[in-house]
Image (spheres, helix red, strand yellow):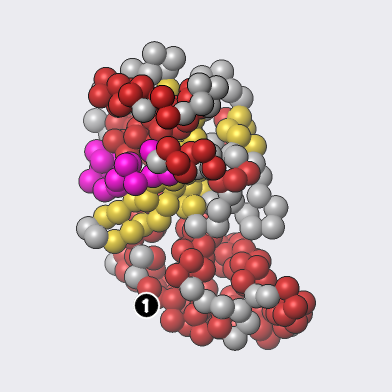
Amino acid sequence: MNTQELFGQLIPIPPQITDYLQRISGDIEPSQFPEIAERAIAVWVVHRYLKRFDYQSDFRSSSAWNIAAQVLTDWGDLEIWEEGESLGIVECIPLPANAESLEIPEGAVISDRIAYIAVEINPPQTWGKIVGFTPTLEIEDPELSIDREDLLECDRLLDLLELAEPLADPSRFAELESYWSGLGEWSAEARQAVVAQLERALLLETMEPLQVESAAQEVEALIAQSVAESARELAVRENAEDESRQELRSILRRLFESLRGAED
């Protein structure tokens, strides 16, 4: 059985999952419960799916399984791990069988999300399947409606997670951190947002120049967001200078080269 065939399988949803959600339904407004329950099941389906490939996650730690959080948010976050290293956070979104597009909730557009995964669940909630996904969104102009036919095939989700493995090493970002700190504030959150954009560029572009340029444009947007409003104009102006922009692209090129070296 090849990877594509395995990804085409349905994920049985055990009665314990739906029974538990029914037990806690008393704590939820009746009008909200179907949507909250479906989002929680979508997270579980992604968790169970990736477990087949030895990726770890704790669906119970997702906001979708936290009733208090669900009253305030519509997140379906799930953090993925491998051998003790976090590979990033994916967003799990239910997709009706007849839906022509994946609608990403505006509140779920967060820069640390490495992917938005579409999950179809049958009406009796006895099985679910991953329909496809889109990698992290562009910073300045995120597209919140993705046509179903434009979703990446599920086997490419494994490609994305394989890209995430070497990027989990913070030491790879020493050069970029130094560059970034001269313009804005570097943080763990900034690094995760950069990781998501690097993965997007590597997944969607096949030629190195396009990978570098795509990643650089998004990193520039992230830097602009990381500085105080009063300093933003200066940061953008400095970043627009050819020398500074070329330095960033050289840093990203070397980072991509180090990733290819890790594969050898």
Residue 253 image position (x, y, % from top left):
51, 74
**Residue 213 falls left or right of residue 50:** right
Q: Say if residue 215 shows up in the picture.
A: yes
Residue nearest the observer in this picture, 121 or 131: 121
In reply to whether residue 146 is colored magenta, the answer given is no
Amino acid type of the residue tagged 1 in the rendering: Ser
Q: Tell me the crowding category of disc 1: few under 14, some 14 to 19, or many 20 or more residues within 10 angstroms, Cα based.
A: few
In reply to whether residue 52 is colored magenta, the answer given is yes
**Residue 77 falls left or right of residue 141:** left
Residue 219 versus residue 120 in the image, above or below: below
Q: Which residue is rendered at x = 48% and y = 47% of the image? A: 115
Residue nearest the observer in this picture, 88 or 197: 88
Q: Which residue is rendered at x = 36% and y = 57% of the image? A: 87
Secondary structure beneath disc 1? helix
The mark tally for this picture is 1
Q: Which residue is rendered at x = 38% and y = 18% of the image? A: 125
**Residue 89 falls left or right of residue 3:** right
Residue 224 versus residue 130 in the image, above or below: below
Q: Say if residue 129 shows up in the picture.
A: no
Residue 114 image position (x, y, % from top left):
47, 52
Residue 47 versus residue 18 in the image, above or below: below
Quadrant for the N terminus in the image: top left
The outermost residue toward the front is 27
Quadrant for the C terminus in the image: bottom left
Residue 129 figure quarter: top left
Magenta residues span 50-65
Q: What residue sits right under mark 1 in the picture? A: 171
Q: Which residue is rendered at x = 61% and y = 25% of the image? A: 100
Residue 53 image position (x, y, % from top left):
25, 43
Residue 260 image position (x, y, % from top left):
38, 67
